[in-house]
C-alpha cells in the first residue's frame, strides 16, 4: 500500500482518477461493439492501452473490496459485541436484583398453587399440584439462579404447604420418600399445612407413614381418603397446633360386594385422634353425618363449621351434639336439603353464632328457611342465603328473627325485585344493617323506593345504623326517572353503591 492509500479503505486518489477515465463509451465504441468491423490502428492502440489499464485498476478494486469487507466484518463484530454488552449490562441493572428477599418470598408465594380447602369436587386427582413433583412449585423456583435458590431454600414456609396426591406414586417406591424427606428438611420447623388425596387405602403407604410422624406440626389439614387412613391417625400422640381440618371420606363403591366393602368400612372403629387436638376450632366437611358417626371431637370447642357438599340423609346426631354449643361462631350449611336444614336450625340453641351461610341453591319442592330460634337469631350479625322472589313473606319472617343483623347477602336464581326490601324490611326489621349484597342470577330490578331507602339510611337516626355498603350484581334495565339516576350516581361516587 502506497503512502497515498487510505489505511481504512485502501482508496488512492491518483489511481482512482486514472481508472475512472478509462471508461469512455463513445458512439464509435458502441458501433464497433454492435458489428464485426475491426477498429482502426489508432483505435486499436488506444483500446489495448485501456484494457491494460483496466486490468490493473480491477486488481486495485479487488484489493479495496477485501479491505472494505474486512472493515465491514470488524464493524459487524463490534456491533454484536456492543449489543451483547448492552444486554448484559441491562441484566445486571434489572430491577429484580434489587428486590429484597422478603418481597421475593411473597412473589414466590403466588407461584406456589394452593389447594387447601377448595371444594373437594373441584380437586380431581389428575389436577392436583403435588409437592413431590420437581417440575412445579418451589422446586422450579430453586433452579432459576443461585440467588433465587438461596431465597427459596431460606424460606421454610414456602415448603410447609404439603400437597400429596397418592395416585402419583407407588407405596413401595423409595423415590417419593426421599423427595418427601427433602421437603420436610426445607420446611425446617415451620408449621405444616397438609393436603392429602387418595381414593385408595394409604394407611400403610411409606410416604403417609412418614407424614404422620409430623402430625404435631400440622396447623391445618385437608384430607380426602378412605376411612382406614383416618383410623391410622389414632396411633399418633397429639396434634398440638392443629387449628382447622377439612375432611372428605372416600367410601367404598356401593356396587362392590358386601364382603369386599367390609374390608374398608369401620364397624366399631372411630377416629378419636382429633380429641388430642386442643387448638382445633374449624371443621370443613362435605358429609357432616359421617363426621358425627366416625369421629370423636370436642365439639364444645368448635367455632367454625362448614357443610359444603350434598347431603340427603338426616344428620340428627349433629343437631343433638351442637344444639347447645356456646362456642360456635360461624356456620355454613351447603346442599343439605330443606328438611335437614329446618330440622337442624329448629333445634339449634347457639347464643354465640355470628355468621350463618345458607348456601343451598333452592330446588323445586323445597321450602324457604324458617325463622331462627331467639337465642340463635339474636346473636347473628351476618347472614347469607338463597331466596326466590315469591318468598318475600318468608324472607321477612326470617329477618325478623335476626334483629341485630349487620350484613345481609341475598342470592337468587330469578330476577330479584329489591322493592321487597325497602323501608318496612331494611329499617324496621333489621335496623342495624350496614352492608347489603344482592346477587341475582337473572338480574336485579332497581326501584325508586329502594334508592330512596339507601339515601335515607345514609343519614342514620337513633336506633338505625348507617348503611355503609350496597353491592348489586347483574342489574337489569329498568325505567327509572332521571332524578333517581342522579341519586344512584351520587351514591356510586360516595363509594356506597357498587355494581358488578
Image: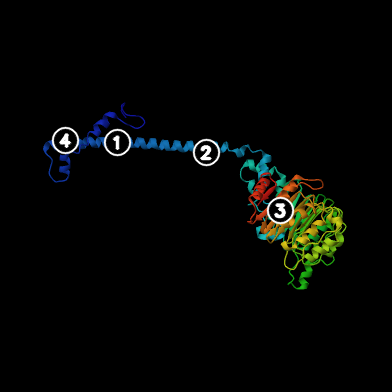
Which SS class for mark 1? Answer: helix
User: Which residue corresponds to mark 4?
Assistant: 46
Quadrant in which the N terminus appears: top left
Residue 239, image x and y in percent? 82, 52
Relative horizontal placement of residue 472, taking residue 407 as reference (left or right): left
Upstream in the sequence, badge 1 or badge 2?
1
Is 261 above or below relative to 221? below
Upstream in the sequence, badge 3 or badge 1?
1
- Estimate the spatial distance between the alpha carbons at disc 4 and disc 1, rounded to whole Å: 22 Å
- Estimate the spatial distance between the alpha carbons at disc 3 and disc 1, rounded to whole Å: 94 Å
Viewer-side label of 3, 2: 3
- Estimate the spatial distance between the alpha carbons at disc 4 and disc 2, rounded to whole Å: 60 Å
Please tell me the numbered disc located at residue 87: 2
User: Which residue corresponds to mark 3?
Assistant: 449
Viewer-side label of 4, 2: 2
**Residue 207 visible at all:** no
- Estimate the spatial distance between the alpha carbons at disc 3 and disc 2, rounded to whole Å: 64 Å
**Residue 187 visible at all:** yes
User: Which residue corresponds to mark 1?
Assistant: 61
Amino acid at each position: 500500500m502506497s503512502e497515498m492509500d487510505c489505511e481504512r479503505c485502501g482508496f488512492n486518489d491518483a489511481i482512482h482518477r486514472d481508472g475512472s477515465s478509462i471508461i469512455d463509451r463513445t458512439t464509435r465504441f458502441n458501433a464497433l461493439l454492435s458489428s464485426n468491423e475491426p477498429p482502426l490502428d489508432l483505435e486499436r492502440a488506444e483500446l489495448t492501452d485501456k484494457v491494460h489499464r483496466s486490468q490493473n485498476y480491477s486488481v486495485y478494486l479487488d484489493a479495496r473490496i477485501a479491505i472494505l469487507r474486512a472493515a465491514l466484518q470488524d464493524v459487524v463484530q463490534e456491533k454484536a459485541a456492543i449489543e451483547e454488552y448492552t444486554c448484559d449490562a441491562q441484566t445486571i441493572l434489572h430491577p429484580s436484583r434489587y428486590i429484597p428477599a422478603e418481597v421475593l418470598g411473597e412473589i414466590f408465594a403466588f407461584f406456589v398453587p394452593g389447594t387447601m380447602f377448595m371444594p373437594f369436587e373441584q380437586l380431581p386427582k389428575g389436577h392436583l399440584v403435588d409437592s413431590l413433583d420437581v417440575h412445579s412449585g418451589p422446586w422450579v423456583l430453586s433452579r432459576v439462579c443461585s440467588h433465587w435458590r438461596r431465597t427459596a431454600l431460606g424460606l421454610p414456609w414456602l415448603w410447609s404447604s404439603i400437597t400429596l396426591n397418592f395416585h402419583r406414586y407407588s407405596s413401595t417406591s423409595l423415590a417419593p420418600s426421599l423427595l418427601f424427606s427433602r421437603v420436610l428438611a426445607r420446611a425446617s420447623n415451620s408449621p405444616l399445612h397438609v393436603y392429602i388425596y387418595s381414593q385408595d387405602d394409604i394407611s400403610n403407604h411409606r410416604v403417609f407413614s412418614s407424614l404422620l410422624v409430623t402430625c404435631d406440626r400440622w396447623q391445618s389439614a385437608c384430607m380426602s381418603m378412605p376411612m382406614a387412613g383416618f383410623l391410622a391417625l389414632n396411633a399418633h400422640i397429639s396434634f398440638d397446633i392443629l387449628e382447622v381440618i377439612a375432611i372428605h371420606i372416600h367410601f367404598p363403591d356401593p356396587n362392590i360386594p358386601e364382603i369386599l366393602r367390609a374390608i374398608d368400612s369401620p364397624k366399631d372403629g372411630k377416629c378419636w385422634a382429633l380429641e388430642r387436638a386442643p387448638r382445633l376450632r374449624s371443621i370443613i366437611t362435605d358429609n357432616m353425618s359421617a363426621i358425627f358417626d366416625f369421629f370423636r371431637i370436642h365439639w364444645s370447642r368448635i367455632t367454625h363449621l362448614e357443610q359444603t357438599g350434598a347431603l340427603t340423609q338426616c344428620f340428627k346426631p349433629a343437631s343433638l351434639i351442637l344444639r347447645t354449643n356456646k362456642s360456635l361462631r360461624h356456620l355454613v350449611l351447603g346442599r343439605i336439603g330443606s328438611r335437614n336444614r329446618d330440622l337442624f336450625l329448629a333445634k339449634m340453641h347457639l347464643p354465640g353464632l355470628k355468621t350463618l351461610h345458607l348456601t343451598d341453591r333452592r330446588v323445586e319442592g323445597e321450602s324457604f328457611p324458617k325463622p331462627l330460634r331467639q337465642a340463635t337469631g339474636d346473636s347473628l350479625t351476618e347472614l347469607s342465603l338463597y331466596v326466590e322472589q315469591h318468598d318475600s313473606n318468608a324472607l321477612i319472617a326470617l329477618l325478623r328473627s335476626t334483629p341485630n343483623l349487620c350484613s345481609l347477602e341475598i342470592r337468587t336464581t330469578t330476577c330479584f325485585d329489591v322493592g321487597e326490601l325497602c323501608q318496612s324490611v331494611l329499617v324496621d326489621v333489621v335496623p342495624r344493617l350496614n352492608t347489603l349484597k344482592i346477587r341475582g342470577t337473572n338480574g336485579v330490578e332497581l326501584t325508586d323506593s329502594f334508592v330512596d331507602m339507601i339515601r335515607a339510611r345514609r343519614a342514620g337516626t337513633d336506633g338505625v345504623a348507617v348503611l355503609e355498603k350496597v353491592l348489586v350484581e347483574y342489574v337489569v334495565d329498568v325505567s327509572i326517572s332521571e332524578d333517581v339516576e342522579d341519586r344512584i350516581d351520587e351514591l356510586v361516587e360516595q363509594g356506597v353503591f357498587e355494581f358488578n
